[in-house]
Each structure stands twice: as structure tokens, then as C-alpha cells.
Amino acid sequence: MDVELRHLRVVCAVADAGSITRAAIGIGSTQPALTAAVQRIERAFGGTLFVRGRDGVFPTAFGECVLVRARAVLAAADTMHRDAARFLAEGEKRPVALGGIGGSMVVELADRLGDSGRGQAVSVTTEFSPLRLLDLVAGGQLDAAVVADYPGHLLPSAPGVASRPLATQPVFVAIAADHPAARRAEIDLAELAGERWVLGPSDGAGWPECFEEACARAGFRPQVAHRSTELRPLQRLIAAGRAISPCQVTFPSSPGIAIRPLAGDPLWMRYLIAWSADGAFAGDTDALIAAAEAAYRSDTETSLPYRHWLARRAGPVKEQTCHRVTPGRGIPLVGQGVLASDHLIDEG
């Protein structure tokens, strides 16, 4: 295996965190996957980089030698990316770089920006971790990104990155179509206490911790039988009745799966658009926000379960003005579940 920049970033992340588990959360991975990755990297270097102690993991003498050089290489690579971005911005037009969490909203946004007459190509990068996306925006690798956070788990600010909330929406549940609970229009979360769940690993930004907190409020601890971030295995597990899963309202419909709201809406998520303060949208943030709002509407309007939820809760969709995220404030929870309003819930 040839050592690449991504391998050096893994080594530095583990050293900085002092723990495989904490490093995995920070980069949107899992502890077993990151442990295996470190072992492969050590084989590539031909020596042991870390040793485990009572308080975490620590670099060996050989690891310290590698770390010094890895940090220098990464710093040089980051400088090269920034200088290249400035050169292209000042000379020929470079592609607009967009990022997004899992889902189709970032693709909808790319379509709108590509058709906006800016005369620039648009590239898309998806990441499981919102924190990783913010890092890419802060580092200049992305011009903007669609990210998400949750009540009690607000995304931290990133240097040189501005953000605006787009919308809040409830979290639904995906179950087998022949599950007894699928006959109901809404499902009480407490009724699912004995179910087997399939969840993704921690994204470092509050998922699935916020889901586990909602289950605790409902009086149970979820039995996590499977872990998956891939759509097709997830759909197969659910359709076969081997597990159920919390899901976004835009979870793709497929045969054998029913998407249902949770009674009382015990769990919410918020979408935000983040952009580089000195990137491609620095002088045209209104156009970016308008395109992101349109992308959100287009992405959600195809969800029949969500349309039914809206009809039961509040009737027609009412668009409202988005407001900048204020540090220390809470997540706007809009009864109609659409664009973010200025009604914020204090987090204490």
C-alpha cells in the first residue's frame, strides 16, 4: 500500500485525539474501522506508530518521527490547495465545489447552481460527518456545504465559515411494510422498545446520540442489531423485517418498506447551508441561500409521507425568512416543518 495524504490525516487525528474511539468520531468513522486502518498504515510504514496505555493511545518514538513529517506534508498540501484555489479564482474559473451529508439535497443544489448562469461547472462531494464538511469548507476545499444538526447538538462554528439555517424537519421511522405498526398513520416511539434497530456510526455531530436520547425519554434503550451507512443493505434489512431504522423524511421509498412519522414528533433535525466567507459565494450569498431553499423544497416535496405529515400538522406550507445561526441559541422548530423561522428554542 502506498501512503497517501488521507493516511497521514488519520495518523494525525489519532495522535491529536489520544484515542482511537475519539478520533473515529471526529472523522466520521468507527472504532473497528479506524483500528484496522491504523494497522494497515503501520504495515505500510514498516513500524508501530502507537501504543495503548491506560489513558488512551500514544505515539512511539517511531510514531513521533512520522508525525513530525506528516504534519509538515499536510501543511504544505493545504497551502498548495489554498494557493491553487486563489490562482484559479483570479484567473480561469474553477468548478464550484459543493459538499453535503447523505441524501439528494446537495445534488438538487448543484443542479440549481449549475443552471444559474454563473458559467461555472459544479462538483459534489458527500461525507457522512457534518464536522468533516465544515473542515473542508474552512480549508478551502469546498465553497459551500449542506450540513445538519440536532436539538441539543448544535454544530460548532468553524473559522472563516458562515452558515444559515434552512429548515427543520421531524425524523421518521422506516419499518417493514407488513409490520403491525405500519397499519397506523403514526407510531409511538415507546411502542418500538422491543424492536431491533439498524443505525449508522456516530457522525461526531450528534447522530445517533440524539436518537438514543429520544429513546431514553420514551423509557427504553434501543437494541442496535446492525450498523450501516449504505442505502441498499439498509433497505434490505428493513424490508426483510430484520430491523427498523430512524430516517429522514426523504428516505427513498422501496417495495416492502413503510415510512411513518413518530407520534408527538420526539426527534428533529435541522438543515443548514454553510459557505466559505472568502470563497465563490462571498459576494453572492443571497443567491446561494435562495438556491439552497429551493433545493430543500424540491427534495422534500416528492416525499408522500412528509406531505401527509404536513397536511395533518399545519396545512399548506408557509415559507419564512431564514436567520443566521447565533452561537448559544437553539434550533428553530417550525410547526409546519419547512423553512426556518425566527422562533428559536433555548438550549439552556
Image (tube, rainbow, N blue to C red):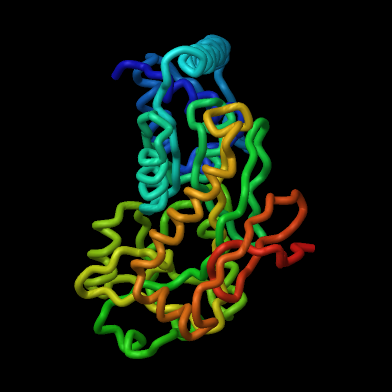
Residue 237 appearing in the image: yes
Q: Is 216 situated above or below 20? A: below
Residue 308: x and y, percent? 41, 81
Q: Which of 280 and 270 is in front in this view?
A: 280
Looking at the image, residue 223 lies above or below residue 16: below
Relative to 254, is 76 on the left or the right?
A: right
Q: What residue sits 56% from the left and 56% below the top?
A: 166
Residue 157 image position (x, y, % from top left): 68, 41
Residue furthest to the left: 255
Q: Nearer the viewer, residue 190 or 290?
A: 290
Residue visible at 26% across and 75% down?
241
Q: Is residue 151 left or right of residue 258?
A: right
Q: In percent of the image, x 48 and y 48: which residue is there?
A: 291
Q: Is residue 62 visible?
A: no
Q: Which of 154 and 161 is in front in this view?
A: 161
Q: Residue 336's quadrant in the figure? A: bottom right
| Residue 119, horizontal then vertical, whole percent | 38, 29
Q: Which residue is drawn at 53% across and 26% down?
A: 140
- Asked if 208 appears above or below 306 in the picture, the reply is above
Q: How many labels sit on residues? A: 0
Residue 68 drawn above or below residue 193? above
| Image coordinates for residue 30, horizontal then vertical, percent | 44, 45
Q: Quadrant of the N terminus?
A: top left
The image quadrant where one finds the C terminus is bottom right
Q: On the rendered structure, is 292 left or right of 161?
A: left
Q: Quadrant of residue 297?
A: bottom left
Residue lying furthest front: 117
